[in-house]
C-alpha cells in the first residue's frame, strides 16, 4: 500500500502562483511514475502533469503547458507541481497518484488539495 499526501493548495488571485507537494509513505518513488490530476465540480478528472521518477521525463496536459512545472526532490521523496499564471479555470481539487512506470492505471491516490483561483 502506498500512501500519498498532497499539500500546498489554497486561495490565490488570477495570475498568481502556488506550489503543490506530494509526499509518500514509501522510501522511494523509484520505478514509479507520479501524476498530478485535477477535478473541478461537474467536470471529469483531468491529467495535469506526469513525471517518471527515475528519468525525470515529464509530460503535461495541453491546458497547463507553459504555466505548470512538475519536478521531484529525490532526497525528500517529494513531487512538486509549480503552478504559475493561474486562471480561474484552474480551480479544482488536485490529486497526486502513482503507478509503476510500465502500468497504465494509477492504483494509489492521495486525498487531494483544493486550489481556488479568484478572478
Image: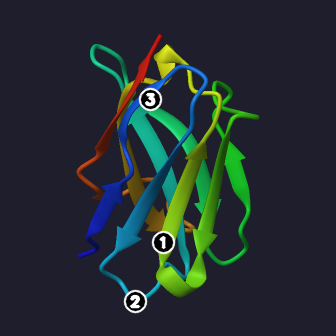
How many numbered badges does the structure rendering display? 3
Can residue 43 be seen in this snapshot? Answer: yes
Residue for badge 2: 27
Residue 81 horizontal/vertical position (percent):
55, 51
For mark 2, give the secondary structure.
Answer: loop
Q: Earlier in the sequence, mark 3 or mark 1?
A: 3
For mark 1, give the secondary structure.
Answer: strand
Residue for badge 3: 12
Which mark is nearer the camera, 3 or 1? 3
Q: Residue furthest top?
A: 119
Of the pair 5 and 50, the residue shown nearer to us? 5
Q: Earlier in the sequence, mark 3 or mark 2?
A: 3
Can residue 104 be seen in this snapshot? Answer: no
Mark 3 touches mark 2? (CB < 8 Å): no
Tell me the quarter of the picture where residue 30 sits. Answer: bottom right
Distance between the alpha carbons at the discs numbered 3 and 1:
23 Å
Task: Determine crowd level at label 1: few under 14, some 14-19, many 20+ residues with C-alpha closer than 10 A.
Answer: some
Of the pair 24 and 7, the residue shown nearer to us? 7
Distance between the alpha carbons at the discs numbered 1 and 2:
10 Å
Q: Which mark is residue 78?
A: 1
Amino acid at each position: 500500500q502506498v500512501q500519498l499526501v498532497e499539500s500546498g493548495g489554497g486561495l490565490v488571485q488570477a495570475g498568481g502562483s502556488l506550489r503543490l507537494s506530494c509526499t509518500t509513505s514509501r522510501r522511494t518513488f523509484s520505478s514509479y511514475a507520479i501524476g498530478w490530476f485535477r477535478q473541478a465540480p461537474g467536470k471529469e478528472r483531468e491529467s495535469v502533469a506526469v513525471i517518471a521518477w527515475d528519468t525525470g521525463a515529464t509530460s503535461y496536459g495541453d491546458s497547463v503547458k507553459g504555466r505548470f512545472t512538475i519536478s521531484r526532490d529525490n532526497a525528500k521523496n517529494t513531487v512538486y507541481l509549480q503552478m504559475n499564471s493561474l486562471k480561474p479555470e484552474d480551480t479544482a481539487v488536485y490529486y497526486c497518484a502513482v503507478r509503476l512506470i510500465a502500468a497504465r492505471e494509477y492504483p494509489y491516490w492521495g486525498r487531494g488539495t483544493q486550489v481556488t483561483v479568484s478572478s
